[in-house]
Image (tube, rainbow, N blue to C red):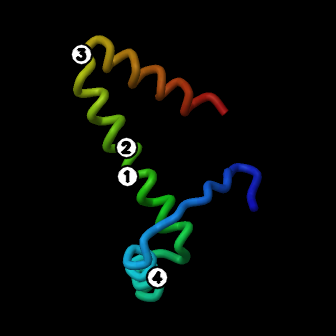
Amino acid sequence: MSRDRTSVPVSLPPELVTELDALVERGAFSSRSEALRHGAHLIVRKERRARLRELTDEQARDEVLERLDRKRTP
């Protein structure tokens, strides 16, 4: 496993695993892990956007600028 990742065990209902496997089989994802990572990114992005909408305009601007600064700094 790569150093930039943490393993997170997860239990899923068999029907969901079947759907994930079908997505992998059709080539939408290279593996179950890739599909689950994509889903986790979507959830985090959705929650982040909801949180930003709740902040005042000034707070949102500050948070965006802070994230941009972190992104620019290696």
Tell me the quarter of the image containing the N terminus: bottom right
The residue beneath circle 4 is 21
Q: Are the residues flagged by discs 2 and 1 in contact, CB closer than 8 Å?
A: yes
Numbered badge on residue 45: 2
- In space, the residues marked 4 and 3 are separated at their CA atoms by 42 Å
Q: Spatial distance from mark 2 to mark 1, Cα to Cα?
A: 5 Å
**What residue would you read off at disc 1?**
42
Q: Which mark is residue 57?
A: 3
* Residue 73 position in % (x across, y down): 62, 28
Q: Residue at x 53, y 73 (%)?
A: 32
Q: Nearer the viewer, residue 1 or 10?
A: 10
- What type is the residue that disc 4 sits on? Asp
Name of the residue lying farthest toward the bottom: 25
Tell me how far mark 1 sits from mark 4, CA to CA: 19 Å
Mark 4 falls on what kind of element? helix
Camera-side residue of 50 and 74: 50
